[in-house]
Amino acid sequence: MDKRLLDILCCPVSKSPVSLLGRAQLEALNSAILAGTVVTTAGATVGTPLAAGLITADGKAIYRIEDDIPVMLADEAIGTTQLASFPA
């Protein structure tokens, strides 16, 4: 992802800056997705593992990146509190 774009993106709800998910974070999230236990803030089940994602600075929300385009929709966010052993 372009560094300039990453510098201007923020969470649409909290206005918190975002950064790329780390490898361990992405693996933990995708394991939970494959187990069928991950839902968006709107309550929709996330069925497809993420290739990449953005996480808010406070670590509370994750936004997926599809085809190098961040999906920064509040209803599409994934709350990290539902992930039992999510790395900080």
Image: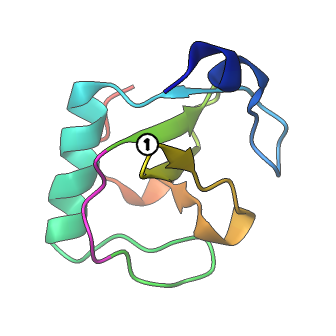
Q: Which amino acid does the dot numbered 1 rest on?
A: Gly
Q: Tell me: 34 left or right of 22.
A: left
> To which quarter of the image does residue 27 belong?
top left
Q: Tell me: 59 left or right of 23.
A: right
> To which quarter of the image does residue 86 belong?
top left
Mark 1 residue crowding within 10 angstroms, few (<14) / some (14–19) / many (20+)? many
On the image, the x and y values in percent for residue 42 come to 63, 80
User: Which region shows up in magenta?
Assistant: 47-51
Q: Is residue 72 above or below residue 38?
A: above
Q: How is the image coloured?
A: rainbow
* Residue nearest the observer in this picture, 23 or 79: 23
Q: Which residue is mark 1?
A: 53
Q: Residue at x 33, y 25 (%)?
A: 22
On the image, the x and y values in percent for residue 56 come to 62, 34
Q: Residue at x 31, y 54 (%)?
A: 50
Q: Residue at x 54, y 48 (%)?
A: 69
Q: Main secondary structure of the magenta part?
A: loop
Q: Tell me: 57 left or right of 68.
A: right
Q: Tell me: 3 left or right of 32.
A: right
Judge whether residue 19 can be spotted in this image. Answer: yes
